[in-house]
Image (tube, rainbow, N blue to C red):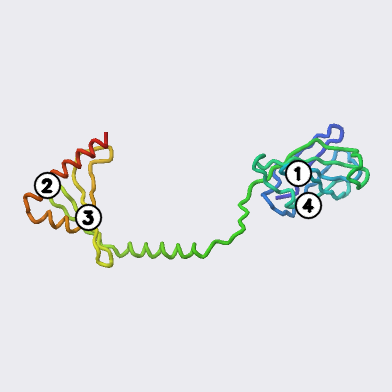
Amino acid sequence: MNDLIINIEKSTRKVELEQLYLGNDHENLQEKLIFTFDEFVNGQARLEYEINGTKNYIILTKENETYTIPVKNVITIYQEDTCGKIEFQLVVTEGTDPEEIPVFKSNIFYLRCRPSINAVNEAPEGYELWIEQANEKLNEMDNLNISVSKEGDTATVTVTKKDGTEESVEIYDGETGPEGPQRTRRTSRATRRARNTGNTTDQQDHREKHLQLRKHIQVWQK
């Protein structure tokens, strides 16, 4: 950011700003607020402001025919209820006594302050541990063996983990519904072996259960 020039017209007290943004929340900047006049008002200047219901002022420095003040973090405070808007007013008195009657007051103007994260804690060590665990899981996935077989209208997908354990999913051909033309069911290896024994009773029971399951799914899909 560059220095913020604030122009004041003496006769009307009107304030003209080159920009509206003061900085980010709690920023301690090297730039200055520089107040200029079309007709300089000589005296002791202070910048009054209100933040979170509290009114304060800062004494300005006279430089030739301007008044200046560094942008400090006492005024770069984001107020959520005003969306960052801070009201200011330039006041000029004849002396340094704050009770002295002002000889000049500008119109009230405002500048905006943007919000900041303002983090105060370092990330805990557990964050790095979590990344290591996630990487281990990814490595395990690289060691999976996946095979697919099909018998009639049933396709079986078998996943063999690196420790030798298996998990199977059966995919049955079915009528097209809201979820697509296929439905899946997870089965154990023992169930798949029993279906291949040729036991007619078991096959009939399996078909009846499959039809009942299909009816329930059709009702659910409606």
**Dot placed on the residue nearer the N-terminal end, 4 or 3:** 4
**Dot placed on the residue nearer the N-terminal end, 2 or 1:** 1
Measured as percent of width and height from the top left, residue 203 is found at: 10, 49
Specify few, some or many for label 3: CA neighbours under 10 Å numbering under 14, 14-19, or 20 or more. some
Q: CA distance from mark 2 to mark 1?
A: 80 Å
Q: CA distance from mark 3 to mark 1?
A: 69 Å
Q: Give the vertical position of 116 relative to 14 (above or below).
A: below
Specify few, some or many for label 4: CA neighbours under 10 Å numbering under 14, 14-19, or 20 or more. some
Residue under the point 27% across and 67% down: 163
Identify residue for label 4: 70
Question: Is 170 displayed left or right of 46 in the figure?
Answer: left
Identify residue for label 3: 157
Measured as percent of width and height from the top left, residue 74 is found at: 74, 51
Question: Which tag is nearer the camera, tag 3 or tag 1?
Answer: 1
**Dot placed on the residue nearer the N-terminal end, 2 or 3:** 3
Identify residue for label 1: 54
Question: Which tag is nearer the camera, tag 2 or tag 4?
Answer: 2
User: Helix, strand or loop at disc 4?
Assistant: strand
Quadrant of res 173: top left
Q: Are marks 3 and 1 in contact (CB under 8 Å)?
A: no
Q: Is residue 19 visible?
A: no
The amino acid beneath tag 2 is: Asp
Measured as percent of width and height from the top left, residue 65 is found at: 88, 45
**Dot placed on the residue nearer the N-terminal end, 3 or 1:** 1
The amino acid beneath tag 3 is: Val
Identify residue for label 2: 205
Question: Is 192 displayed left or right of 163 in the figure?
Answer: left
**Dot placed on the residue nearer the N-terminal end, 2 or 4:** 4
